[in-house]
Structures are given as structure tokens and as C-alpha cells.
Image (cartoon, rainbow, N blue to C red):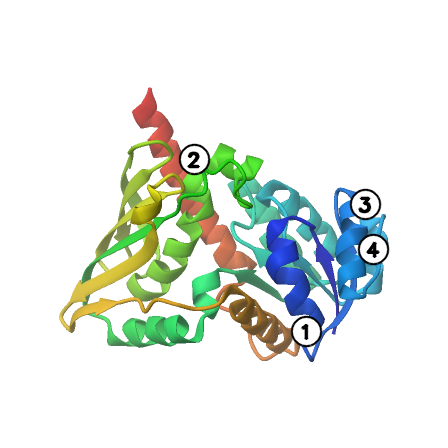
């Protein structure tokens, strides 16, 4: 499969480009970026071609991997699907529900496959744990916390990007928590409560289709010594904790493998654009509650 990379930022340089170059079943055919000089730098480093025209890249490939801010990703994903390209997307798929709906609709109407790179879902130990807990059932409640220090006194942090500064932890790490909670506890029937903590920290209470509830704490401004991701389930089977660990490059390699499988018609992926849309809808519902609480 010939694949192109859209984006030249830290995530693209650190993870996407090396993985696409090394993947044995992919032909890393080119890079496009909003800054042509950055695209050339990435392309030269990985032995591929830099494109000035995104549509020219889309015409030359079978799929695209996207590492761009969510609002830019959504617009280009629609164009890529229209050009017949399969989609390896980043989370969140869009910054608005309307944008995510456009992506899901474009992929469906074009008949292309899509995989959204919710990192935890592609770490083998975590993915196996999620599947086991979903099969076990009987969960009463869960607590998830994703705490980072991207904006805690680190002006040069590679992920201190404008869109994260604007949208905060809810939209950056919130998708990770939801990507684990939804397959285990069921869809979110409603966001029962949302409150702000220090800086960009948010706290959510979710009601799930299974009848279980969950609480979620998210931050990109936690003290460095307090960072980390944890998720604990409690129910009739006792207590179960999401395993730690996993390498982002290995996870993206697995996501690419699963996009290849979906493109061969094996089945729609569980983390496809439609699932990405549902996660975006939950984030937007929480954002609305947070805005109402601030008035």
C-alpha cells in the first residue's frame, strides 16, 4: 500500500515518519506539510518525496496517515476520502462534532477504511485487557485519569502546540480515556457532570449504556511528579487495572497493520471514523457543560 503523510510536526517527525518508512507492507510515498521547508526536511530524512500540493499527493497514494491539528485533519481527511484514500487518523478526528461528522460521512460514502490512532487501543497488552474486561462484564464503576505536564512550566515541550493550548486536556487526552471506557462499559448515555480544576484540569462523571458510571480526570498541566495514566474498574469480578507501558511507534505500527486489514475488507475497524465521531460528540457534550458552569 502506497501511503502519504500529512503533517510535519513533532508527532509526525517522532513517530509517524519513522514508522511509515520502516513498515514492511507500506511504501512511504511522500510527505505534505503546511510549511514546505518542513516537508522537505522530513522527506529527505526518510528517503521519500516532499509534495507542495496536497491533492497531488492524494492522487499518488492509496492511503494517508494524518498528524495535524484536529480542525486541519478533518478538512483534509474529507478530501483524502474523496480521492479514494484510506485514512489513518489521529485523535480527536476533529475539533467539532460537525467536522467529525463530515469525516465519518466522507469515509462511508467513499467506501474507504479508517483507523483512528487512539494509542492505548493499539498497545497489545492494553488491547487484550480491554477485550477481556468487555467480555467479563458486570462492571459497577470505573475511574480514569490521564495527567500530563505539557504546559506546566515547559515552554519548549514538543507538544505545547497552539491547538492543545486552546482545547486543553479534555480534547487531547480525553479521547484516550474514552477509547478505553466505551468498549468496556458501553456508550456514554450522558455526561452527568463536568467541572474544572486547577489550570486546564477537568473532571467528568459519565453514565454508560451498561448502567455503570465512570469518573474521569484529565490534565495537561499536572505537576511533573504527578503525571501518568491510570484506569481502574470495579465490579462483580473484583478490581481490574489497565496495564501500563507500551511504545507509541509499536502501537502505530499495529494501527497501520489493522488499517491494511480493514482495507482488504476483513471488517470495519472498531476505532474507525464513526467511533471517532462518537468520542467527539461526548467531548463536545462535556465542553458544553463546562462552559455552562463557567457562567
Viewer-proximal residue, 192 or 116? 116
Instruction: State which quarter of the image contains the C terminus.
Output: top left
Q: Is residue 131 visible?
A: yes
Residue at the (24%, 61%) spot, across then down: 232
Binning the other alpha carbons within 10 Å of mark 1 as few (below 14), some (14 to 19) or many (20 upward) gives few
Residue where numbered disc 1 is placed: 22
Judge left or right: residue 276 versus residue 233: right
Choose the circle earlier in sequence order: 2 or 1: 1
Q: Do labels 1 and 4 touch, CB within 8 Å?
A: no
Q: Tell me how far mark 1 sits from mark 4, CA to CA.
A: 18 Å
**Circles 1 and 3: CB atoms closer than 8 Å:** no
Q: Label 3's element?
A: helix
In the rendered structure, which disc, 1 or 3, sits on the residue that comes first in sequence? 1
Label 4 to label 3: alpha-carbon separation = 8 Å
Res 50 label: 4
Label 4, label 2: how far apart the Cα atoms are: 35 Å
The image position of residue 15, as x and y in percent, is 60, 61
Q: Secondary structure at mark 4?
A: strand
Is the residue under label 3 in contact with that under label 4 (CB below 8 Å)? yes
Residue 105 in sight here: no
Which marked residue is nearer to the observer: mark 3 or mark 2?
2
User: Whole-Å distance between the Cαs marked 3 and 2?
Assistant: 31 Å
Which mark's residue is nearer the viewer, 2 or 1? 2
Mark found first going from the N terminus, 4 or 3:
3
Disc 3 crowd rating (10 Å Cα; few below 14, some 14-19, many 20+) is some
Place of residue 139 in the rendered image (x, y in percent of width and height, measured from the top left): 20, 65
Q: Would you name the residue on which mark 2 appears?
A: 153
Q: In this rendered view, identify the residue nearer to me: 55 or 125.
A: 125
| Residue tagged 3 | 36
Secondary element type, mark 1: helix
Amino acid at each position: 500500500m502506497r501511503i502519504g503523510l500529512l503533517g510535519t510536526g513533532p508527532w509526525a517527525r517522532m513517530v509517524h515518519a519513522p514508522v511509515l518508512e520502516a513498515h514492511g507492507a507500506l511504501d512511504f510515498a511522500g510527505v505534505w506539510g503546511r510549511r514546505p521547508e518542513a516537508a522537505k526536511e522530513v522527506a529527505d530524512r526518510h528517503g521519500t518525496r516532499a509534495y507542495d500540493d496536497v491533492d497531488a499527493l492524494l492522487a499518488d497514494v492509496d492511503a494517508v496517515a494524518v498528524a495535524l491539528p484536529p480542525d486541519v485533519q478533518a478538512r483534509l481527511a474529507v478530501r483524502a476520502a474523496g480521492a479514494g484514500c484510506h485514512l489513518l487518523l489521529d485523535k480527536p478526528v476533529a475539533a467539532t462534532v460537525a467536522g467529525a461528522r463530515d469525516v465519518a460521512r466522507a469515509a462511508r460514502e467513499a467506501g474507504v477504511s479508517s483507523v483512528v490512532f487512539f494509542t492505548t487501543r493499539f498497545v497489545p497488552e492494553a488491547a487484550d485487557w480491554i477485550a477481556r474486561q468487555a467480555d467479563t462484564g458486570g462492571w459497577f464503576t470505573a475511574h480514569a485519569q490521564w495527567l500530563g505536564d505539557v504546559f506546566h512550566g515547559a515552554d519548549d515541550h514538543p507538544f505545547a502546540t497552539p491547538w492543545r493550548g486552546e482545547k486543553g486536556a479534555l480534547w487531547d487526552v480525553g479521547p484516550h480515556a474514552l477509547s478505553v471506557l466505551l468498549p468496556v462499559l458501553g456508550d456514554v448515555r450522558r455526561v452527568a457532570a463536568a467541572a474544572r480544576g486547577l489550570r486546564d484540569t477537568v473532571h467528568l462523571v459519565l453514565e454508560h449504556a451498561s448502567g455503570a458510571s465512570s469518573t474521569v480526570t484529565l490534565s495537561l498541566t499536572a505537576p511533573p511528579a504527578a503525571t501518568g495514566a491510570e484506569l481502574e474498574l470495579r465490579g462483580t469480578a473484583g478490581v481490574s487495572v489497565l496495564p501500563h507501558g507500551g511504545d507509541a511507534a509499536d502501537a502505530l505500527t499495529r494501527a497501520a497493520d489493522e488499517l491494511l486489514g480493514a482495507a482488504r475488507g476483513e471488517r470495519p475497524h472498531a476505532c474507525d471514523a464513526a467511533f471517532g465521531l462518537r468520542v467527539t460528540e461526548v467531548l463536545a457534550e462535556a465542553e458544553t457543560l463546562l462552559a455552562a458552569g463557567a457562567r
